[in-house]
Image (tube, rainbow, N blue to C red):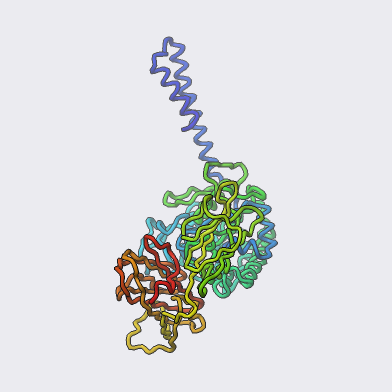
Amino acid sequence: MSEASIVLKSTLFSAISGNLHSVFTKELLLKTIVFVIISGSFWSCAKKDRENSPLVKHVVVIGFDGLSPDGLNKATTPTFDGIISEGASSMHARAVLPTSSSTNWASMIMGAGPEQHGITSNSWEKNNFILPAITQSEDFLFPTIFQLINDNREDAEIGAIYHWTGFGRLFEKGAVDYDINPENEDKTAALASAYIKDKKPTFTFIHFDHVDHGGHEYGHGSPEYYKSVEKADELLAEVMEAIKASGMADETLVIISADHGGLGKGHGGESLGEIEIPFILWGKSVKKNHVLKYPVYQYDNAATVAFALGIKRPMAWIGKPVKNAFEGYDLRDDYPITERIMKPTILPPADFYKRAGGLFDDSTSIIMKNPNTIGEIRYTLDGSMPNLNSALYTEPVKTSENVVVKSAIFMNGKIVSTVSEAFFRIKNRTRAAPISYEVFYLENLTSIPTLENKKPDARGSCFEITSDEVKEEIRDNTVVRFTTNIQIEKEDTYVFYTNSDDGSKLWVNNQLIVDNDGDHGVIEKNGSISLKPGNYPLQVVWFNGGGSGWLNVDYQTKTIPKQVLSTSILK
């Protein structure tokens, strides 16, 4: 409610209460009402004008596919570092789920999530989708920032220069003046720079794809991945130099972000490494060396562009402009981003998708390390979340049975890190491998094929159902069938999980329990079955269509915490 409205209500209340005892009072009331209405109108107009007044004349959005905060933190990036120090940024912005490219690039330019725009995977096409957009700017396409600028600025020059061909299907072609898909990142930077200097566009969107290639080929966190981030820094310098050379830098907002991070050699899951992205703003009206303390979401990108250009956002958009990045705005509430220090390291450490811990003969020691110079480690061995009353870690913990370790850093009676998790499995050193597997080399796989009447190309045995056990035999278009038996000691509902890239299926007692099929990145799915004491056949089929792949299988009951399907349950 405006101040003017409050004054008006107060005055009317006094009048109704019987305070009009004279003509003077009535005249005063009339004048007050007129004044308040006029003042309220001015106040409302002033607020509206400020909201819809452009802050800049030009906006350049630069997106790096697969760029994670970890990449910026560990690679040598002088250009990124300089822009961050001269602008406002967050290393805790969040992508949308699933953390796939199409879904997130769409959310970035559409100011909405997949629930609104309907682009729920990389397989989305205008002639191949499940969820229709809730509203559309053209057939089957949710309105993007390109269309919004085109509709509201008759003289706007709009360009899209994108390294990944798939980005071109996500926006309205008629809204863009310059639409080009260069063959590599170097040409992308060169063409974008030339376009900026020549046209001084109102809105430019630049997409680089090579960082994602580094993640998929070598793995996020690898030296090669960090090299790809350093190449991104060089390309960013080229574009920034073009902006300055064009003469439009003083009237320009630059937004730098990404579609997702990554884990191992892929993405698509729900981990912080996959969902956290950088969000960096630089240019006119942007605060200097400012860390954004409140949440930023993928779909806030388009809303921020519209706000900077003074364009009203559609009601269908859920994105909000990141106003706290700009001078003159200091909005606050009670829920800033939760800042946490680094979590404990449990040895053996996680390696890409492989979880910390491992399978050991007879017994092992659990070693934890605090990567910080402050705080203490508290831990549990039963899969429960650690708290202030949990055991304090002071020395290696020996175990001769399966345990699920969870640990965190505590300070001043509070948890101050995320939780580390590790799975330790113990087997008798004389035990034979309880799982048999068959490997099939096929062609053009996009889902699990029927294996009936197919002869395996290789056979073997192993201790756990995981791609690690057969990694030397995996190539493109490979199917692996794992077969074993589970020994159930107590009647319960058993939940089974497959976590895989690409598809997988799990059967218990010849019933399909988990269907995680399809050509996709690492995704976890589960299913449950009630089992009485006894022995039951268990089978898992998994395929790797191309590139790196992954598979692991977990299980859980009401009394057994979620953990790797270990030899203790296998017959």
Q: Quarter of the image holding residue 553?
A: bottom left
**Quadrant housing the C terminus:** bottom left
Measured as percent of width and height from the top left, residue 325 is found at 60, 48
Q: Is residue 530 left or right of residue 12?
A: left
At 38% from the left edge and 60% from the top edge, which residue is drawn? 559
The vertical placement of 316 against 363, above or below, is above
Q: Residue 208: x and y, percent?
A: 58, 67
Tell which of 430 and 2 is nearer to you: 430
Image quadrant assignment for residue 484? bottom left
Residue 275 visible at all: no
Direction top: furthest residue = 22
In screen coordinates, is 143 left or right of 357? left
Q: Nearer the viewer, residue 399 or 176?
A: 399
Tell me: 303 left or right of 449: right
Position in image of residue 11 (x %, y %): 45, 21
Q: Residue at x 58, y 71 (%)?
A: 210
User: Which residue is located at x 32 percent, y 85 percent?
Assistant: 452
Query: Would residue 399 be visible to someone looking at this image?
Result: yes
Residue 131, x across and y down, in percent: 36, 62
Of 487 and 156, nearer the camera is 487
| Picture residue at 42% right of the left edge, 62% below the top | 561
Image label count: 0
Please tell me which residue lies in front, 363 or 240: 363
